[in-house]
Image (spheres, rainbow, N blue to C red):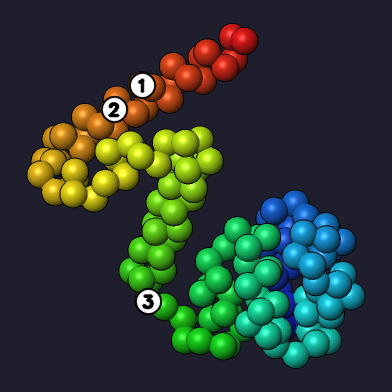
Amino acid sequence: MSPFGQQLRELRRARKLTVNQLAVYSGISSATISKIENGKRGTPKPATIKKLAAVLKVPYENLMAAAGHIQAFPEEIREASEGYQSVYEIYQTAVTRGAEHLPIFNSQKWEHLSKQDIENLSKYFDFLSSEAKKRASSS
């Protein structure tokens, strides 16, 4: 088994997906996925890796590095990339709920906030989230 194949199998299993499920969700045949995992197929092309990364919810760059297509990023860059991905997912959720117009998504609004202001925002958001969960569980 190749290191990439082993990593692919571990990621798939961590997401509790079968080879067939990963195949359906990614559009890559189950035979191809099986061959990759078992080291019986060469390094996947970037397009294949992109599909796998999307389904497995891992940064594309990480899988590209694991496959040897690019040099691995230093840990600080990888963490920043994952942070940006989280922010992007939050923004996507806001867009689907019609909330992208809120001032929290305006970077200019953040320029003058102090560390204490940001901590207060965080506490308030936690409070709102907690209240929403309570409402959802009581209905």
Q: Amino acid at mark 1?
A: Phe
Find disc 3 in the rendering and name its residue: 74
Distance from the alpha carbon under mark 2 to that under mark 3: 32 Å
Instruction: Say which element carries label 3.
Output: loop
Q: Label 2 is placed on what type of residue? A: Lys
Q: Which of label 3 and label 1 is nearer to you? A: 1
If the image is split into quadrants, where does the C terminus sit? top right
Amino acid under label 3?
Pro
The correct choice, above or below, for 29 with respect to 124 in the image is: below
Image spot of residue 122 (x, y percent): 29, 33
Q: Position of residue 56 (x, y in %)?
A: 65, 60
Q: Gap in Å between the C-alphas at discs 2 and 1? A: 6 Å
Taking the image as shown, residue 43 lies to the left or right of residue 79, namely right
Which badge, 2 or 3, is on the more N-terminal residue?
A: 3
Residue 75 in percent (x, y) is at: 38, 71
The image quadrant of residue 114 is top left
Residue that carries the numbered disc 1 in the rendered image: 127
